[in-house]
Amino acid sequence: MRIAVDGMGGDHAPKEIVKGCIECINEVDDIDIFLIGQKNLIEKELEKYAFDSTRIKIIHASEIITNEDKPVKAVRRKKDSSMIVGLNLLKERKVEAFISAGNTGALLAGSLFNLGRIKGIDRPAIASVYPTTKGISLLVDAGANAECKARNLLEFGLMGSVYVEKVLGKENPSIGLANIGIEEGKGTQLIKESFELFKKTDLNFCGNAEVRDLPKGIVDVIVCDGFVGNVILKLTEGVAMTIMSMLKEQFTKNFINKIGAAILKGSLKEFKKNLDYTEYGGAPLLGINGAVVKAHGSSNAKAIKNAIKQAKIFVEGEVVQIINREICRIGDENNAE
Amino acid sequence: MRIAVDGMGGDHAPKEIVKGCIECINEVDDIDIFLIGQKNLIEKELEKYAFDSTRIKIIHASEIITNEDKPVKAVRRKKDSSMIVGLNLLKERKVEAFISAGNTGALLAGSLFNLGRIKGIDRPAIASVYPTTKGISLLVDAGANAECKARNLLEFGLMGSVYVEKVLGKENPSIGLANIGIEEGKGTQLIKESFELFKKTDLNFCGNAEVRDLPKGIVDVIVCDGFVGNVILKLTEGVAMTIMSMLKEQFTKNFINKIGAAILKGSLKEFKKNLDYTEYGGAPLLGINGAVVKAHGSSNAKAIKNAIKQAKIFVEGEVVQIINREICRIGDENNAE
């Protein structure tokens, strides 16, 4: 499978991106990589490694879309950026998937402009894994659409469900609306209307998912608008980081505490691993007519490697095609009523 | 000062409520308590203690509003409930403040019906303390209004600011809009419009407050709609609890870990104290024409004691009067433009 990777996107580009590509082809046999970016910089990084050069092809792109760029403007003007060149490779079917750790808004806008939406989907969304004590949930929308209609939330649930089943390998995933209580009728007008729409489908809809219990892994697909989704992701990260740093402070406060902490070191490491995003690959853009995966901005090589592997399953699972089929089916059923 | 306390509200009523009242009068000289509820039950609890009986007066109320009651219906029908009797005491100026650990929605609806709004305030809000590494922030609205207009968020900021200054004792408190990024123009339409309104005032408005950084105590007053506010509170609690239980699991996994944890016991306790709501009293209903404080549903005696002490400062700080004055001033300034 041919997968394109944005060599210039993310905080540690191109170094960690290139390293991640190398690690990926060493681990997985049937992936060939199109690595896009400023040729001299990419080559300089590649020189560090011994690898089968037929499996990584450099595609030169002179420009870079940075995090400071305004998404729509950047997408329109920087036609020779690594991101836009990568999306065009996907559009022209020269590759089967595209991964970028760059500007999220630009990746979303660029994907919309270049690849378009899946027919029947009104609003594509970013789906992010959400680590829980019971494994991972998928959060849709994680930040693409600050304002939504009920129809959009229904689409998010459907797309998330397909992705969890086909890529994360969980059959008949449960779907819940992120809410401040489990009773029907709780929350905003948007949630109440979405609740009604979900009830009419044959999706595995479990009603409202109390946000307090999200870290316990109560549903497989957490559905919410992009503002609330981004709040959930960032606040979870913020609280976890704050608690870890408070603990660290306690654990290094004096000699005896250091001994206690040293004893627990292995366990603390295992615990931290649960919260580590690099384990989980990237965030797929669901609803885009193509397999596009957003890797975390601070991705290291391991995160990039996992994102590429995940993109492969995304393609093999025919997620785009199945979303298209399922959204048509649900639409037909509603029309038949 | 005379303060009314709902003896029947909360998970541990009347036992912990009565105990909290006793502890409070033992600690603070100039508080007399009107303890409202089913006389026989309250008396039975009071019998456990030796105390100055002139300082706690039982007011009989035959009914109880439970957490299962629908707020508006309960408020209309259960006229002789401890909650409604208490609010009426406040309305008739027989007491200067009222505290309840009961049904939040009913307390809000009952306060609106019986006491009304402060003139100039469109929507009263629940203000909750939010524990951070730098002390406490105040979160407004914590859950009273799922849907808001920009004008409401401005009011929340103003009311929160007055409360933090007068009750929590922090001068010129900083105000931030809870958002998924700090740049102006981020977030929902509601937040963008609120941002514009705040900019026109002389409040200490600091712009957007990135939710990831809320646990670090970046602003004194966190402003958001009641849905997002409730998500922030509950998710913070959920993530913290989940991490604590994951740590506990690690710490008791084997003998050597238990030794490590034993060494750190004191530090872990200190750490937990930071997250303990009982330290911080209750959540004031801001914008109501009277000093009403909602104590946590699972309040123990200490939480009740602290809520009563806090209500006293609420009254002494003339929070209601100052909110009225400030909202008029801001209104006048806008009209004068």
Image: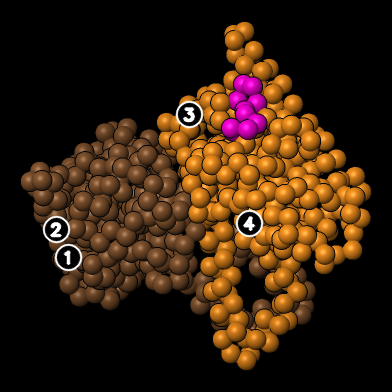
Chain colours: A orange, B brown
Give yes or no for residue A120 being in the magenta stretch: yes
Spatial CA distance of label 4 from label 3 is: 31 Å
Of tags 4 and 3, the one toward the viewer is 4
Q: Which mark is residue A10?
A: 4
Q: Which residues are magenta?
A: A112-121
Question: From the image, which quarter does the C terminus of chain A lie in?
Answer: top right
Q: Residue furthest top?
A: A336
Q: Quadrant of residue B262?
A: bottom right
Residue type pointed to by label 1: Gly
Circles 1, 4 touching at the beta carbon (< 8 Å): no
Mark whose residue sits in front, 2 or 1:
2
Three-letter amino acid code of the residue under disc 2: Ile
Which circle's residue, 4 or 3, is located before the other in the chain? Answer: 4
Question: How many angstroms separate mark 2 from mark 1 (CA)?
Answer: 9 Å
Write down the residue under mark 2. Answer: B322
Q: CA distance from mark 3 to mark 1?
A: 44 Å
Q: Secondary structure at mark 2?
A: helix
